[in-house]
Image (tube, rainbow, N blue to C red):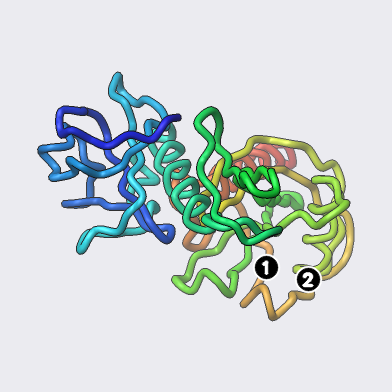
Amino acid sequence: MMQQKLTGRERGWWIVSLENRVWLPQGELPLGTAEQWTLQDQMAIPIGEWQGEKVWLIRRKMVSDMSSPRLISDRDDKLFQLVGRGVQLAEFYRSHRYCGYCGHKMRPSLHEWACLCHHCHERYYPQIAPSIIVGIRRDDHLLLAQHQRHRHGIHTVLAGFVEVGETLEEAVHREVMEESGIKIRNLRYVDSQPWPFPNSLMVGFLADYESGEINIDPVELISAAWHRYDNLPLIPPPDTIARRLIEETVALCRHQSLSNR
């Protein structure tokens, strides 16, 4: 984890990131030597390995081609996780240059992802915001919503952040009630996905409808409705946990429909 000044001979994948953006010349993550990409004399830190090559993080902003990491989210899950790690670490180090307790300058730890204050001895770690996301089934229909933050016609499942003192399961029930006005049952865990926008861990669940009528929270949602599994609107891309939850709910709906014949 030790940061080092590049000579130009170092080789690998280069995550150049600042302010939640990543350098993607020609839309790709750079691969090669530091000299090839004019990165010699930069300070870099190794953060992992992908396809047999070291992955390096450089915390700086390039003059062009600074993009959202979403552009490579569909390439490879492992690569996306490493880029997400780099983007989050770059932002963590940028926002923790000074101690929040005493105001003195801090330095990165040489042994772990942390920032250290030698004045008051506080130690800071990157913070991860857990959030829940849930696919909800009602017979052969699933609940899909348009979120205020997704204004491209995409319909997706409900999601929200876990609050202080709350379990993941309690967060699911609360978020579903707050956003849609319905109650759910038979809640079960499916999968999780690191989501660096900016620092979330998405924890995915499936659930069944129990009772209530849809009554949306207009602050969070544009609309919400039950959609038959074989007649869906525009949904999220395949690389997302939201898409997996939708596909698994569709499979359950299809099974329910066939069983009723």
The residue shown at (59%, 57%) is 104
Q: Which residue is outermost to the front? A: 119
Helix, strand or loop at mark 2? loop
Q: Which residue is outermost to the bottom? A: 218
x, y percentage for residue 55? 33, 31
When the figure is inspected, residue 49 is found, relative to residue 123, above or below; the finding is above
Left or right for 204, reference 96: right
Mark 1, residue position: 225
The residue shown at (80%, 57%) is 163
The numbered mark at residue 183 is: none
| Front residue of this view, candidates 161 and 91 | 91
The residue shown at (63%, 66%) is 145
Neighbourhood count class around disc 1 (C-alpha, 10 Å): few under 14, some 14–19, many 20 upward:
some
| Front residue of this view, candidates 51 and 232 | 51
Residue type indicated by callout 2: Ile
Residue type indicated by callout 1: Ala
When the figure is inspected, residue 130 is found, relative to residue 114, above or below; the finding is below
Mark 2, residue position: 214
Helix, strand or loop at mark 1? strand
x, y percentage for residue 190? 68, 35
The total number of labels drawn is 2
Asked whether the residues under the numbered discs 2 and 1 touch, taking CB atoms below 8 Å apart as contact, a structural biologist would say yes
Left or right for 92, reference 248: left
Residue 21's quadrant in the figure?
Answer: bottom left
Neighbourhood count class around disc 2 (C-alpha, 10 Å): few under 14, some 14–19, many 20 upward:
some
